[in-house]
Image: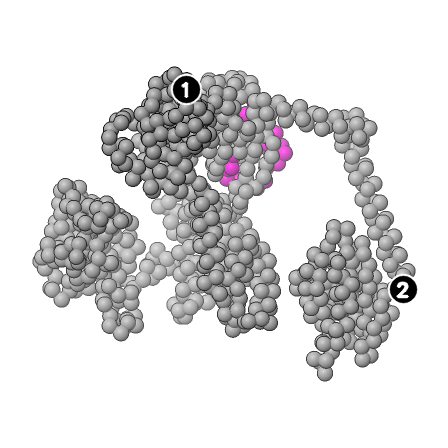
Amino acid sequence: MLGNFSFGDYFKSEAIAMAWVLLTEEWKLEPNRLRVTVFSGDKNAPRDDEAYSAWQKFLPADRIDAWGAADNFWTMGETGPCGRCSEIHLFLGDDPKCTEPTCRGTACSCHTYIELWNNVFMEFDRQDDGTLKPLPMLSIDTGMSLERATVALQGVDSVYETDLFQPLLQAIAELVGTPYGKQRKTDVSMHVIADHLRAMTFLISDLVTPSNEWRGYVLRKIMRRAMRHSKQLGLTEPSLHRLVDVVVQEMGDTYPALSSNRDRIVNVVRKEEDRFDTVLNTGLAKLEEVLDRAETGNRCVTGEDVFRLYDSLGLPAEFVEDLAGERQLSVDWEGFERLMAKQRDQARAASGFKTKRDGASTFWTSEALDKKVLDTQDRFEGYETTRIDGGMILMLWNDAPAPCTQLDAGNTGYFSLDRSPFYVEAGGQVSDTGHIVSHDGKMKAVVEDMALWGSFPRLHRIRVIAGTLSQGDVVSAVVDAPRRRAIQRNHTATHLLHAALRQVLGHHVTQAGSLVSPERLRFDFTHPTPLSQTDVEEIERLVNEQVLTSIPVDTVEQPTDEAISNGAIALFGEKYGDRVRVVSISDFSKELCGGTHCCATGEIGSFLIEQESGTAAGVRRLEAVTGTPAIQRQQARRSLLNGILQELASPETRALDVLKEQQAQTKQLARDVKILKLKLELASETATHIDIDGVTLLTRRADGLDKGSLRTLADQLKGNIKSGLVVLASATEAGQVVFIVSVTPDLKARVPAGQVVKALAVLVGGGGGGGRPDFAEAGGKEPQHIDHMLSESENVVRSLLDNKE
């Protein structure tokens, strides 16, 4: 995005003149290809005659269009600064033709014109009632697309025809074996791939990884959309990662981070492609079941089915639409959208109090505040102390939440304090808890949580347990100090952990999320593979080495640029002001952080990593404990180990060998039992023989056998018949159903095993199954229906034989 701005200096006529000079004299665009728009006026604001007159100096009246507020009035929202605007459009020629009955030119979506530039004249302040008040200072706020400017300068009709996209589009065309520019449908897919590939390359370079949350979800969505279009172009194997080098080659000189992160980008894209293939394989199999049901029902795929495929399996809704269309089935898109809306509402509701931020500005202007009960601002003083005396209650809210003047004993609500020692949740660190008490001791309230809300730096959620709390009261605010110290131990340990990870794994490691609570710490970080036990032990050793040294933890406020240039780690996605708080632990760790910390690392006591796991592609998680919880965990493990050693009747030095020996013996016994069960079934002659017009059907229940044993049994039974099929089923020890169908070669065309399995699987709560015409297998969840399924197999075989007559 390009732009030029003025704050109280030049205005409409100057901005328009400068734009015209740049486009026609500096960039040499043909003046007769330019057309402009101005605001036509409405009930709120008159026509922009000033802009119209300014343009008449350069263009005839028939090339100055006047449009309404939808096209030529810019706003920030329902209230706030706004103004009329004037757009500059570039004529692309008569091809492509407009498909509208009456082309609206610069206000039409026919692509005859493209908007190059928008001059926004910020001159009004929209009030709550919709009226416009003149701003005391007039401003210019313009926007121009760099890529559309490239279209104009290179004399092409589309951004995809510029040298920004052509190398990538030609590489895509070569990869898929389809020329670019020949068919609109394939061109659209190539455009999507090119556009999304550039976006994903930059996002991954900026250390975003595909996931199901926040920015990672946006990345995953655009990656999978590109992958879906690659499938539509006929690419059956993961291929997009092979195109990353084209983006890096074209843009790496201007954006060096692309070149330095090239291997990581390729790796992340390849892994997401493999994951998407897995999603498709699972999702498409389930989709086939859904489509089969719809075909035999009302020929409509339910919104619930589409939602389940999308939400649980990650199958894009577009796949449902395409494959349903191939079978001429309709889709309940309204039902799908209802479920999606419900899920979004539930997600918003789950975010709790913070979702009500927008309403807070009303409370600032409430009658209680207008009375100027107090004129101080909420300040956090919890770095230096866990107790504040003489704090004043600024505002009170009940549970609604609505403003109130007092809360009585038994009530819960919220309050804002002029000076507070309570830390509000941020940067992964949980909020403080504690209590407040009046100076005479008659009022006492428990602070249960903290919240951010609108303009307030912190709100305290309280439960009044004695007396009455009133607006303007002076109180003592006391943080739960032991809990705060536990939180500080885990927060300082988190910084040590982050530094140790970068030392052991490499500087590509960046924080992707964290939780710092009194009980434990959790740290998510970018890394492509699971950590080895050696890595975990080395990280743990490095952190404990800093703990034992008891290094002072220093904090200082600095200008943001200075702090970062001095090596402080800033978290991607966090917003920082002009000045930041830097937390340093000697030369081992230095981070921008607003949380509370130990005075020295020795206060941590002990650091113990509990678990290493993955949370998303390219994101790992470590969970750890410090202080007393770490000692308790070690004691619990020692107690558990002693119990295991007693059961094994082995000294600690021999315990692992003894355990391996016992496991080997157990496995051998299990194999022996399996062989004995199979021998018993092979020796038995309990199979049911049914003759169906000369075709022999053998059915048999053999509980306890796995699929391999069932195949062996089926081969023996099939060898005893000339023409026919064998249906065997087993209830496993895990309470599941496995069954197989084996058909003699002469019958596989008339009675395909896959069709028999597909018809029988539903009777035991299973899916469609699969296999070859002469052999197929499936499973189920309802072993109580095995006998019924075996008896029904006769009807299934008869039906197939009748259809082949």
Q: Can you give x and y, in whole percent of width and height, for residue 297 in the image?
A: 58, 71
Seen in the image, is 644 located left or right of residue 552?
right
Asked whether, in this view, residue 709 is left or right of residue 569, the answer is right
| Residue 141 visible somewhere in the drawing | no
Amino acid type, callout 2: Glu
Is residue 546 depicted above or below 427 in this figure?
A: above
Q: What secondary structure is marked by label 2? A: loop
Q: Which mark is residue 228?
A: none
Q: Is residue 245 magenta?
A: no
- Foreground label between 2 and 1: 1
Q: Position of residue 723 (x, y in %)?
A: 82, 75
Question: Dots 2 and 1: beta carbons under 8 Å?
Answer: no
What amino acid is labelled 1 in the image?
Answer: Lys
C-alpha span from label 2 to label 1: 88 Å
Q: Range of the magenta residues?
A: 523-544
Query: For residue 110, what is the image quadrant?
Result: bottom left
First along the sequence among labels 2 and 1: 1
Report the colour scheme. Answer: one colour
- Within 10 Å of the Cα at label 1, are there few (<14), some (14-19), or many (20+) other Cα atoms? few
Residue appearing at x 60%, y 31% in the figure: 610
Instruction: Where is residue 494? Give x, y as percent.
Output: 50, 29
Q: Residue at x 83, y 73 (%)?
A: 690
Q: Which residue is denoted by mark 2 in the rendering?
A: 685
Q: Which mark is residue 442?
A: 1
Residue at left offset 38%, top offset 38%: 401
Question: Does the segment drawn in magenta span residue 532?
Answer: yes
**SS under mark 1:** loop
Q: Nearer the viewer, residue 378 or 474?
A: 474
What quarter of the picture does the C terminus occupy?
Answer: bottom right
117 or 669, which is in the foreground? 669
